[in-house]
Amino acid sequence: MSGLLALLDDVAAIAKVAAASVDDIAAAAAKAGAKAAGVVIDDAAVTPKYVHGFSADRELPIIWRISLGSLKNKLVVLLPGLLALDYFLPQAITPLLMLGGAYLCFEGAEKLFHAMAPHADEAVAADFEQKDAAHLEEEKVAGAIKTDFILSAEIMTIALSTIENPNFWLQALTLAIVGAMITVAVYGAVALIVKMDDVGLHLAANARGGFLRGLGRGLVRGMPRLMAVLSTVGTAAMLWVGGSIILHGLEVTHLWPWPYEAIHAIAVTLAQAMPATLQGATEWLVTAALDAVAGLVLGLLLIPVATRVIGPLWARLTGGRAAAH
């Protein structure tokens, strides 16, 4: 009898540890997902462009293929790679984060540059004219998965940096949950976005009630505006997250802590001038805005480096042409 009671005590202790681990995983996943929110927003804003120009019946299959590629990026390639790096060379995590942050700054600055100096994308038009739809779809999906790899690497690295528990399996499970949840959230949202105009057309043409027909017409008219807002939010998120990562990395590595400390001091000073209820929001907004400005400046400096040095060099190494943006 005493042996049975001891066994039950052991089982209860194991159950408590398991329950605590589940709570730790859930908390760590939520924290990691929130920390990576800026990159997630950009991921959701970037992806719809890859189905632009294709027939409506190919939109969801393309998104499905990209989402599977994204899941493979996160769980098959990045998760074991990052865990191995964290175990054998943890000091490389911050430089990797900064490298990804620099890429986000470059992408955000380039988007703004092209928005201020718009030009016709002749290469895309030529692709649709010269290539069959199946070949073009393969290229678009491959390009989307490559772009997703960079964004996924940033998301997973940010997530790993927020996990405080040193337990290997807890880290692995948390990263897997974060990767899967973010993939489902991003590509589920993208699927809804790209099909919303079709839903609007269906309601406008077939709905019986006047309210539903009006809602359908509103969806059709509103989708271009929504896409514009998403693009703006995505660009702002890239600059904010990228700038924040770079400045925080410079502070953590003690290479150049002054910008991070100065922005923090400015944000605190301005927040203290506000009513108590607005101080937290003010400090966050000022910090995010100044991080975005820093990200924009860095991104603009990186544009000529990326387009005139890195791009041509990569094209020579891979035997292809430099990526056009």
Image: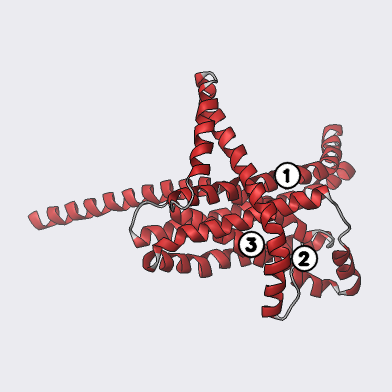
- Look at the numbered disc 1 and give the secondary structure of its residue: helix
Please tell me in which quadrant of the rendered image residue 208 appears: top right
Q: Nearer the viewer, mark 2 or mark 1?
A: 2
Q: What residue type is labelled 1?
A: Thr
Q: State the quadrant of the C terminus.
A: bottom right
Q: Is mark 2 on a helix, strand or loop?
A: loop
Q: How packed is label 2: few (under 14 Cα within 10 Å), some, or many (20 or more)?
A: few
Give the CA separation, mark 3 to mark 2: 17 Å
Residue 194 on image: x %, y %: 76, 52
Work out whether mark 3 precedes mark 1 in sequence or the reverse, and give the earlier one.
Answer: 3
208 sits to left or right of 163: right
* Residue plotted at (55% across, 29% down): 281
Q: Given this view, does label 3 or label 1 mark the residue nearer the observer?
A: 1
Residue at numbered disc 1: 232
* Disc nearest the viewer among 3 and 2: 2
- Vertical side of 267 occupied by 247: above or below: below
In terms of secondary structure, where does tag 3 sit?
helix
Residue 141 drawn above or below residue 248: below
**Residue in front for this viewpoint, 217 or 290:** 290
Tag 2 or tag 3, which sits nearer the N-term? 3
Camera sees residue 84: yes
Q: Residue 148 carries which label?
A: 3
Outermost residue to the bottom: 319
Residue 244 pos. (x, y %)? 55, 46
The image shows residue 35, relative to residue 47, as above or below, that is above
Quadrant for the N terminus in the image: bottom left
Disc 2 to disc 1, C-alpha distance:
21 Å
**Neighbour tally class for label 3: few under 14, some 14-19, many 20 plus, Cα within 10 Å:** many
Calculate the distance from the C-alpha at mark 3 to the C-alpha at mark 1.
19 Å
Q: Give the residue displayed 32% in from the left and 48% down from the top.
A: 20
Q: Horizontal and vertical percent for residue 34? A: 52, 45
